[in-house]
C-alpha cells in the first residue's frame, strides 16, 4: 500500500508540474504579442501629395507689354465714307473744303478719331488711278521722314502700305503699327479705313497727337510695286491735334496771294495799260 500511495503521489505531482509550466508559457507569450501589434505605424499618417504647390500659381508672360500690331492685310470696305461725325467724334480735313466724300466727285477727304492714347481710326478717300495717301509731319516742311499711310489701286483692289516721305520720295517700310485695314476701288475713287498707332509728335512743341496733316496722290506700278512722288492736294497751315474733333483744318495750298504780290500785279497791269494808251495816240 505504501508503494502504491507513493506512486500515485508522484503521478499527481508530475501532472501539477506540467500544468504549471503550460500556464507560465502562455503568460509570457501574450504580452510580447500585444506589444508588437501596438507599436506598428500605419500608412494613414503619411503626408500625401495634396499639399504640393501646383503650376496654377506660376506667373505667365501675358502680364508683360504687348508689341504693336503690324497688319497691312486689306479686307473689303462695303460702305461709303461719310463726314457725318466731323466735329463730333472725328477731326476732318477735305479738298474742296467741306466736300462730302459719300457723293461722287473729286473730293479728297480724311478723318481721324482717337481710340486710345496714340491710336487713331482713320478714313481716307480720294481720286487717283494710282494711290492716295495721308501723311503726318512734325513740322511745317513736308518730306522730313514724314509718317505716311498709302492706299493704292492694285488692279481694282486696294493695296495698303506704310511709308516714310523724305525729299519727295516715298520709301515703303510696312513696319508702322497698323491694323483693321479695309478698302475699295470704284473707277478712280479709292477709299480705305484703318487703325494706326501714330508716333509722338514732340517736335511740334504741342501735344503728342499734334501734326501738320497732308493728303496726296500719285502713281503706282502694279508690276514693280513702286510709288511715284506724291502730288500734295492739302497741307494744313498749322499743326492740328488729331484728338480734338473741333479743330478746323485749313489748307495752306489755298492761301490767297499776299497783298504786296497783288499790289505788284496791279501796278504792272497799270503800266501796261499806260503804254498801250500812248501807242494808240
Image (cartoon, rainbow, N blue to C red):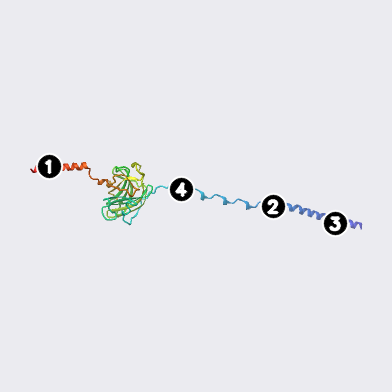
How far is mark 2 from mark 3, CA to CA? 40 Å
Q: Which residue is mark 3?
A: 12
Are the residues at dot 1 and dot 4 in contact (C-beta closer than 8 Å)?
no
Report the front residue among 97 and 49.
Answer: 97
The residue depicted at 51 percent of the width and 49 percent of the height is 57
Nearer the N terminus, badge 3 or badge 4?
3
How far is mark 1 from mark 3, CA to CA? 178 Å
In this rendering, the answer to whether 159 lies above or below 145 is below
Residue 221 image offset from top left, x and y in percent: 29, 49
The quarter in which the N terminus is drawn is bottom right
Query: Which residue appears farthest toward the right when viewing the image?
Result: 1
Q: Is residue 274 visible?
A: yes
Nearer the N terminus, badge 1 or badge 2?
2
Count of residue discs: 4
Q: Is residue 164 visible?
A: no
Element at label 3: helix
Nearer the N terminus, badge 2 or badge 3?
3
The residue depicted at 21 percent of the width and 42 percent of the height is 259
Report the front residue among 76 and 16.
Answer: 76
Q: Which residue is mark 2?
A: 38
Q: Which residue is mark 1?
A: 274
Residue 63 — which label?
A: 4
Residue 4 image offset from top left, x and y in percent: 90, 58
Few, some or many residues within 10 Å of mark 1 (<14, 14–19, 20+): few
Query: Which residue appears farthest toward the left when viewing the image?
Result: 281
Nearer the N terminus, badge 1 or badge 3?
3
Few, some or many residues within 10 Å of mark 3 (<14, 14–19, 20+): few
Q: Nearer the viewer, mark 2 or mark 4?
A: 4
Q: Nearer the viewer, mark 2 or mark 3?
A: 2
Amino acid at each position: 500500500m505504501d508503494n502504491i500511495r507513493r506512486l500515485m503521489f508522484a503521478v499527481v505531482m508530475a501532472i501539477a508540474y506540467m500544468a504549471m509550466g503550460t500556464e507560465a508559457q502562455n503568460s509570457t507569450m501574450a504580452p510580447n504579442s500585444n506589444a508588437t501589434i501596438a507599436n506598428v505605424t500605419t500608412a494613414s499618417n503619411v503626408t500625401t501629395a495634396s499639399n504640393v504647390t501646383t503650376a496654377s500659381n506660376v506667373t505667365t508672360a501675358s502680364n508683360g507689354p504687348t508689341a504693336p500690331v503690324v497688319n497691312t492685310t486689306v479686307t473689303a470696305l462695303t460702305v461709303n465714307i461719310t463726314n457725318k461725325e466731323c466735329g463730333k467724334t472725328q477731326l476732318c480735313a477735305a479738298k474742296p473744303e467741306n466736300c462730302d466724300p459719300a457723293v461722287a466727285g473729286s473730293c479728297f477727304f480724311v478723318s481721324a478719331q482717337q481710340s486710345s492714347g496714340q491710336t487713331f481710326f482713320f478714313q481716307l478717300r480720294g481720286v487717283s488711278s494710282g494711290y492716295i495717301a495721308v501723311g503726318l509731319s512734325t513740322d511745317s516742311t513736308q518730306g522730313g521722314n514724314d509718317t505716311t499711310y498709302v492706299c493704292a489701286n492694285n488692279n481694282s483692289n486696294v493695296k495698303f502700305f506704310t511709308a516714310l516721305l523724305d525729299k519727295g520720295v516715298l520709301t515703303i517700310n510696312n513696319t508702322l503699327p497698323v491694323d483693321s485695314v479695309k478698302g475699295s476701288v470704284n473707277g478712280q475713287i479709292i477709299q480705305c479705313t484703318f487703325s494706326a498707332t501714330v508716333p509722338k509728335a514732340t517736335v511740334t512743341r504741342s501735344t503728342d497727337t499734334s501734326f501738320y496733316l497732308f493728303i496726296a496722290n500719285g502713281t503706282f506700278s502694279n508690276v514693280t510695286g513702286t510709288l511715284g512722288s506724291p502730288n500734295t492736294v492739302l497741307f494744313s497751315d498749322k499743326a492740328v491735334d488729331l484728338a480734338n474733333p473741333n479743330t478746323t483744318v485749313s489748307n495752306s495750298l489755298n492761301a490767297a496771294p499776299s497783298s504786296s504780290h497783288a499790289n505788284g500785279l496791279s501796278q504792272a497791269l497799270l503800266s501796261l495799260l499806260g503804254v498801250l494808251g500812248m501807242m494808240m495816240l
